[in-house]
Image: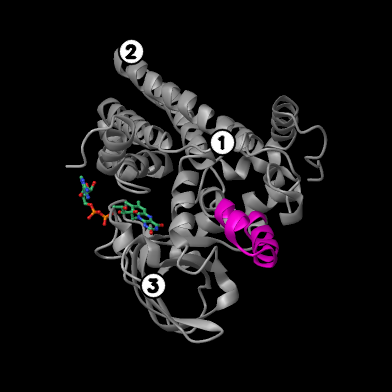
Amino acid sequence: MTTPAHGELTVEAVRTRFTRWLEDHAGDLARFRTLPTEVDEVFASLSRLQRLLHEAGWIRLGWPEELGGLGGTVVLRGVVSEELAAAGYPPPFSFGTQEVLGPAVARFAAPDLARASLPRLLRGDETWCQGFSEPGAGSDLAALRMRAVDAGDHFVVTGEKVWTSWAQYADRCVLLVRTGAPGHRGITALFVDMDSPGITVSPLVAMTGEPDFCSLHLDEVRVPKDRVIGAVDGGWAVAMFVLSCERGVAAWQRQAWLRWRLGGLVEAAPQVADSRVGEAFELVHALRLLSRRTLRSLAAGSDLGVLPSFDKLLMSTAEKYLFDVALEAMPDTILFGGGTEARDWRNDYLYSRAASIYGGAAEIQRNIVAERVLGLPRE
Ligand SMILES: Cc1cc2nc3c(=O)[nH]c(=O)nc-3n(C[C@H](O)[C@H](O)[C@H](O)COP(=O)(O)OP(=O)(O)OC[C@H]3O[C@@H](n4cnc5c(N)ncnc54)[C@H](O)[C@@H]3O)c2cc1C
């Protein structure tokens, strides 16, 4: 595969070149349409897909050249993930991480750290995880307690994280720790090597039956100070930026995938009621329009404020609704079916239940909209 993604970097030019590339390489790419059953094999297969896309240049589009990218705006990353989903391929494993954590490292890490680490993530040489939540610090993230003690040229970190998605495969972690006073002003973001002595990773099995996330125990882990992302005690800004990225290209990728799943539902269950499909289409399309606005604002460098809370709310509503309709239309397949297709519908249905929890629970988004958009009182 040698077709480079170089050339004119307009949205339409990239879309045309990428869809043509997908068609030209359909034979080589066919093996990625159906994923293996074992999680380890899924991970390996999606990493191979990522390397292919990186080799051909597609994954480098929309990232700055000094960080291993090919330039162009963030919208190009959205185009690549959208066309990949529309052609029926799964998103490479670290697409989500790239879009959620990659921009934060690009923006807040020291240039040397960003230059050394981001290309490895884009190439699929390594994956990262997001160590934010703790027992007792989920929605109330500012209550986090993992302690980082200043020891001169490094911090000594001790404590527990939970719900860290796919940490068992991760090479690095963007970790929030307490370096100062209680509350959001005493938090620092660190870029931690997951093979550092003192880190224990324990997979947790979700209701899909897969070890989707892990708990992390850190026992006096040494983290050099050049691994601070942003400023010491300035980790809240990094955390808020990460959460806004979850509503940027990552949300756009999700809506592209939901559109593709909706098409698959109509094919798999043509008897599904028109009104239910219509409503699912409306929700997914409304999400697409909101997400497009967010992407364009990101590309223009605008401050999004609290608006992406609407994207997050609509994303979880659309995702849950779509898979509710799927369950109604194909109860036997989803509840009892064997084979990879039934398994994928079942997993996607179960995972959709989490859409209103991860990345900021729906109730919290409603609070934000109520207080900061509608001006309602805090209590
Ligand atoms: C699939 C999945 C993947 C995840 N991956 C990661 C990851 O990679 N890294 C990571 O750090 N975390 C991850 N999380 C954790 C996620 O960020 C938290 O679950 C989420 O922030 C909610 O926190 P909590 O689970 O502690 O619930 P709580 O904060 O205890 O909330 C419990 C319930 O109370 C409601 N609630 C809480 N406070 C209020 C309030 N003030 N007003 C109204 N209602 C309220 C919540 O909305 C929720 O319904 C993941 C979670 C899931 C489900």
Asked whether residue 99 is in view, the answer is yes
Callout in the foreground (2, 3) = 3
Please tell me which residue lies in front, 5 or 225.
Answer: 225
**Majority SS type along the magenta span:** helix
**Residue reaching furthest left?**
379
What residue is rendered at 67% in x and 56% in y?
123
Q: Which residues are magenta?
A: 102-122
Q: Amino acid at mark 1?
A: Ser
Determine which residue is flagged by label 3: 180
Lower sequence index among marks 3 and 1: 3
Local secondary structure at mark 3: loop
Determine which residue is flagged by label 2: 274
Instruction: Tell me where residue 208 appears, x and y as whole percent.
Output: 32, 51
Label 2 – label 3 distance at C-alpha: 56 Å
Q: Amino acid at mark 2?
A: Asp
- Residue 302, label in figure: 1
